[in-house]
Each structure stands twice: as C-alpha cells, then as structure tokens.
C-alpha cells in the first residue's frame, strides 16, 4: 500500500523553471509531503485556485507574463487563508521584505536548500491546518448536537463537561497533529484515545504502548524496530510499533514516565515524520498520528526538568483534560447501572437491584481510582450477592476502610479546595460539632449510618448527640 496523501489540500509550486519544480517536488515527496501540484505558467495560477484549495503556495518572484510580486496581492485578497511562501534570488532580498509586508507567510532564497524548503513548507501546512481546526472548533462549540454520537456510546456520562470534551474531539479528530490527554488514573484516557482514532478516518490500526518503566533502548527497539544483527540477540528483523500503526494511530500511555533520552527521539519523530530502524541507515517515513496520555502533572515535571519543554509544546497542540469522577458525581447512577449489567452478564448472574442508600454512599466518596475503582467495587459486590437486592454492607466496608486509610494531608487538601474559612471568632466545639453533624446529614439525605461513618463515629454516638441536642432545645 502507498503512503496516505498529505496534506489533504495540495502544496502548489509556481515557477517558470521546470527543473526547480521537479527537484522541489522530489524533495517534498521524500519527506512525506506527497500531495504536490506544479505550475510553470503564472497566468494559470488564479484560474487553478478558483477550482482547487491549497495548503501552501510557493511562488517565485521573477516570472514572465505575471510576476510573483503582481500575483501575491491578488492571492492574498481572494485566498487570505492560504500561506504564501516567496522564492527570491540572493541579491533581491528587498523584494522578499516587500512580499512579507504584502502578506506573504515567509520567503526562501535561491538556490534553494532542500531542508529549508521542506521545513518552511511544513510550517505553512501546520499554520493552514491550525486555521482550519480553529474554524471547525468554533463551529462545533456553537452547535449543541454531536455529529457522531454513536462514537461515544461506550463512554457512560451525562456530564456537561464531558459533552464539551466530546465536541472538542469531533473538532480535532481528523487533524494529523499530536494529542495530549491528561487526567487521573482510571478516568478513561484510553477510551478517549480510541474515540479519537475512530473519528479520525485513518485507515490503519490503533496501536497502544504503556511506556512506564520502559528504558531508552527498549523504547527505541519497540517503537522503531530493528534489522537482523542490529545488536546481540537480534536474530531476526522486527517491525516496530510505528510500522504496525502505519496510516493509523500510536497511543503512548504514561508519557510522563518517559526518559529524557526517549523524549528526544519522540520529539524528532513528531517534528520530522521519519525514523530509522535500529541497525539501519535507511530512513523510513512515519504515517502515524501520535496520541499521548499521562496522569502526571506535566507542568510540574517541566519545572523539575524531567519533561522537555519543546516536546510538551509539541504534544499540547491539542490537549484534553478529563475531569475526575468526584467532579461529575451525577454520572455515578448511570455508571453503576452500566457496571451492574456488565458484571451480571460476565458472571452469568441476574442483574441485582441497587438499594437507594448505595447512591448516597457512593456520592460521599471521592474515588481516587475514579471510574476504574467504581467498576471494581460493583463487580466485587455482584460476585458475592445472592438475593435480588445488591448487598450494601461489603461496599460500605470497602469504601470506609479506604477513607480511613487516607493520609491526613488529603483531608487538608480537601478542606482547602472546599474553601472552609473561619472568621475572627472561632466557633465553640459544640457549635462546630453541630455544623459537622448537619452537613453530614445533608450530604447523606439523613441516612444516619452513612453520616456517622463520614464523621468517624459510631451510629450510637451520633444518635446520642442528636438526642442530646433535641433534649437541650426542649
């Protein structure tokens, strides 16, 4: 199979020198830019643009009939979103400066260096793609409906924040640029990557690699593959994941754990779109979309010099942050129902009925393991249930044992996030106790058993305090 067409709209090369057009097209094709159109008659440019949109136009200044300087303002006026790169002779830099002022994106001096040509055109393509994506994004955000709701069927949510993420995914899915997915463990980053791949329209497979604990040598071998005899033990040639994901998507999970040496290699792969198998001096083109995910705070890693800033800025061209479950607790009933059905089917049991208290209990837990933790809790409860009602006790014990095992710093952080402030006059212990009890009862819809667990006291102790309060008020 041949390489996919890139970019979607062609790069237009305009020059009266046919030898230059041939060599430039050859250099671009060798570097993965294979959708190229050449025109050696400047009078044909405007009629061509009326019928065909372009990603980038490379325009020679000195041509017979209509010069590049004459064509440029006409192109900028009628096709303002297409980046135009001017070609000019070494002794005519002044014309190049005039062109930039007239709206050209950049200029290249003749004789043309292939590396400079490819780099400048690729920058123009990226600018054009970003303009298109920004327009798409605005249109998507103004719409209320998803164009492909079926693509998100496996993600159970009614959250408005998740719906906004879905709309963003639809806007950027077809972009060739990398995507960075962030969020805590268990929020569903891999599922988001699968949806992006599904909506991308890419013909190849989605290939996954968790890079946590992978050293630089293993990373290079896994990603790029190796030739026979590349190193001791390399008895056969091995294809890397890039080749396996050809025309598809490569998903690198736990990217925050990647070594600095491997980060450099990943950056080069993204920037240049090519790589070498270990033991080979033959360059290979990488027709692959890169999606990365991490549960680490990349901003902190950057400041600690554990994550390269240039790689981070490359990856965050499109960034998606998935909120934790505690920030979208309205999803809990829908997730519970989904996991009850899934567990009952896999365990060959009848789907149990969840007690009302279950949702009160779960809504008062912060789920450090997020959706993955909730799924485990439900599967465990279904596996031991015998009657038609899902037993609450094993779930209650599991949740409160985890809450009690939390480090005190977690509580301090919660208090800070919930913005509990004290005024000039502190409340008395009795007043503070009253506030805590009322808040616990409010959160648990007056379920005293769960409220007592939240307060870290027994049900009897809570009853005694409530009776004492009633007796005092009367």
Image (cartoon, rainbow, N blue to C red):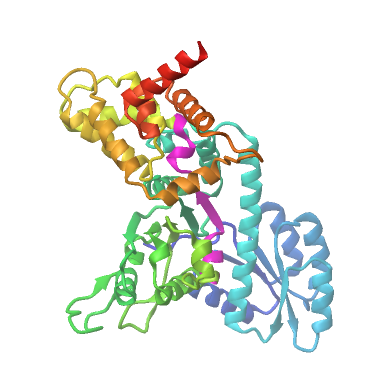
Q: Residue furthest bottom?
A: 91
Residue 348, quarter of the rendered image: top left
Report the side of 406 relative to 132 (left or right): left
Report the side of 187 relative to 107 (left or right): left
User: Dividing the image into 4 quarters, which one contains the N terminus?
Assistant: bottom left
Q: Check residue 121 for magenta coloring.
A: no
Q: Position of residue 433 (x, y in %)?
A: 48, 30
Q: Position of residue 423 (x, y in %)?
A: 65, 39
**Count of residue discs:** 0
Given residues 161 and 426, the one toward you in this image is: 426
Q: Residue at x 75, y 85 (%)?
A: 89
Q: Residue at x 43, y 19 (%)?
A: 468
Q: Check residue 313 for magenta coloring.
A: yes
Residue range (magenta): 310-330
Q: Residue at x 46, y 29 (%)?
A: 330
Q: Residue at x 21, y 28 (%)?
A: 344
Report the side of 303 relative to 396 (left or right): right
Residue 16: tell me if it is visible: yes
374 above or below 10? Answer: above
Residue 343: tell me if it is visible: no
Q: Position of residue 240 (x, y in %)?
A: 31, 68
Residue 458, quarter of the rendered image: top left
Residue 209, quarter of the rendered image: bottom left
Given residues 364 and 136, the one toward you in this image is: 364
């Amino acid at each position: 199979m041949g390489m996919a067409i890139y970019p979607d709209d062609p790069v237009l090369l305009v020059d009266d020198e046919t030898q230059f057009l041939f060599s430039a097209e050859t250099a671009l094709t060798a570097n993965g830019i294979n959708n190229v159109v050449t025109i050696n008659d400047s009078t044909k440019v405007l009629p061509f643009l009326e019928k065909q949109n372009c990603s980038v136009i490379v325009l020679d200044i000195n041509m017979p009939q209509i010069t590049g300087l004459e064509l440029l303002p006409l192109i900028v006026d009628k096709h303002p979103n297409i980046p135009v790169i001017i070609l000019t002779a070494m002794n005519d830099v002044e014309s190049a400066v005039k062109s930039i002022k007239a709206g050209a994106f950049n200029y290249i001096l003749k004789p043309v260096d292939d590396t400079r040509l490819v780099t400048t055109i690729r920058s123009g393509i990226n600018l054009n793609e970003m303009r298109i994506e920004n327009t798409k994004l605005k249109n998507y955000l103004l719409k209320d409906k998803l164009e492909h709701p079926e693509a998100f069927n496996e993600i159970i949510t009614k959250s408005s924040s998740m719906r906004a993420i879905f709309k963003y995914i639809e806007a950027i899915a077809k972009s060739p640029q990398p995507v960075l997915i962030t969020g805590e463990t268990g929020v569903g980053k891999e599922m988001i990557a699968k949806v992006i791949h599904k909506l991308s329209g890419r013909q190849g497979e989605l290939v996954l690699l968790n890079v946590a604990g992978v050293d630089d040598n293993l990373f290079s071998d896994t990603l790029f593959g190796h030739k026979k005899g590349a190193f001791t033990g390399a008895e056969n040639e091995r294809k890397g994941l890039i080749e396996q994901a050809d025309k598809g998507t490569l998903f690198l999970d736990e990217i925050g754990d990647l070594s600095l040496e491997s980060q450099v290699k990943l950056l080069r792969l993204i920037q240049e779109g090519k790589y070498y198998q270990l033991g080979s001096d033959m360059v290979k083109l990488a027709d692959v979309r890169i999606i990365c995910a991490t549960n680490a705070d990349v901003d902190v890693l950057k400041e600690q010099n554990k994550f390269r800033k240039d790689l981070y800025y490359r990856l965050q061209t499109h960034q998606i942050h998935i909120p934790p479950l505690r920030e979208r607790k309205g999803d809990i009933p829908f997730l519970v129902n989904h996991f009850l059905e899934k567990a009952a089917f896999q365990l060959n049991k009848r789907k149990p009925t969840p007690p009302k208290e279950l949702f009160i209990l779960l809504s008062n837990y912060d789920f450090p393991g997020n959706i993955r933790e909730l799924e485990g809790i439900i599967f465990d409860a279904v596996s031991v249930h015998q009657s038609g009602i899902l037993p609450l006790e094993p779930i209650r014990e599991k949740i409160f044992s985890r809450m009690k095992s939390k480090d005190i710093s977690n509580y301090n952080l919660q208090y800070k996030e919930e913005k509990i402030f004290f005024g000039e006059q502190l409340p008395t212990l009795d007043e503070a106790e009253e506030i805590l009890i009322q808040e616990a009862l409010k959160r648990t819809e007056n379920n005293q058993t769960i409220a007592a667990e939240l307060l870290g006291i027994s049900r009897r102790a809570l009853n005694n305090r409530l009776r004492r309060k009633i007796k005092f008020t009367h």
